[in-house]
Image (cartoon, rainbow, N blue to C red):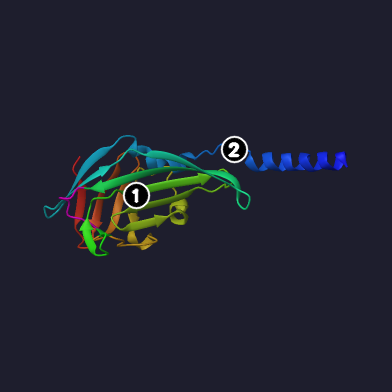
Amino acid sequence: MKTKTQYFFAIIWILFFACTTRKDVAFDNNDLKWLRPFNTTDTIIYRSQNGLSDTITFFQQESNRSSVSSFEQGSYTTYSKSVTYKLTDSSYHKFIQVNSNGIQVYSNSKKQYLFSLSKSNNQTETGMEISFLGLIFNESYLKSLRTDSIKVLTLDEVKAAYKNMNVTEGIKTFDFDFQKGIISFIDYNNVKWKRNR
């Protein structure tokens, strides 16, 4: 009887450590390449060909970690990196939000996610998403891009998972420079907006 009890506890002990052992997660260089322009917080002014402007603060990239430990799901840790941005109230473009009374309002009071990257230690794939002024690109499209030797990449609404999301006037395309970040975009009136510096 004592031997059966010892075997039972030995098996429980092994299963416990097998389920809770954590391995480190590493993002590959192609994933991290998107974050390079956002090592510090920076405010950029974009000017349109017809004299309008957007002032956008791109915040320094952040890293987070969250853990799950349950009998049903096991134990794993999700690591994430993200970049957020915020338009000033004086910017031409506005985000559509719902206030506490349930009414839609145009406001730039909240930060928006520009880029998110996540990976769990129980997965091999990295989740990614880019969202800028209403255009949202998902991981299947972003992973299909060959960015090894590209310095500037144009992201077009034709390949977006969603377009014109929660913004007063959406954009058709934007150019992403892997050293500087977003350098220009084209709105629905075919007006080009360029980074001021």
Residue 23 numbered mark, or none:
2
Say whether disc 2 or disc 1 marks the residue closer to the N-terminus: 2
* Quadrant where the image shows the C terminus: top left
Q: Main secondary structure of the magenta part?
A: loop
Q: Name which residue lies at 37% across and 47% down.
A: 115
Q: Position of residue 122 (x, y in %)?
A: 59, 46
Name the secondary structure under disc 1. strand
Q: Position of residue 148 (x, y in %)?
A: 44, 43
Q: Is residue 2 magenta?
A: no
Q: Residues within 10 Å of mark 1 (few under 14, many from 20)?
A: some
Segment tinted magenta in the rendering: 88-95
Residue with the mark numbered 1:
113
Q: Are the residues at dot 2 and dot 1 in contact (C-beta closer than 8 Å)? A: no
Looking at the image, the residue that sits furthest to the front is 1
The three-letter code of the residue at mark 2 reads Lys
148, 143: nearer the viewer: 143
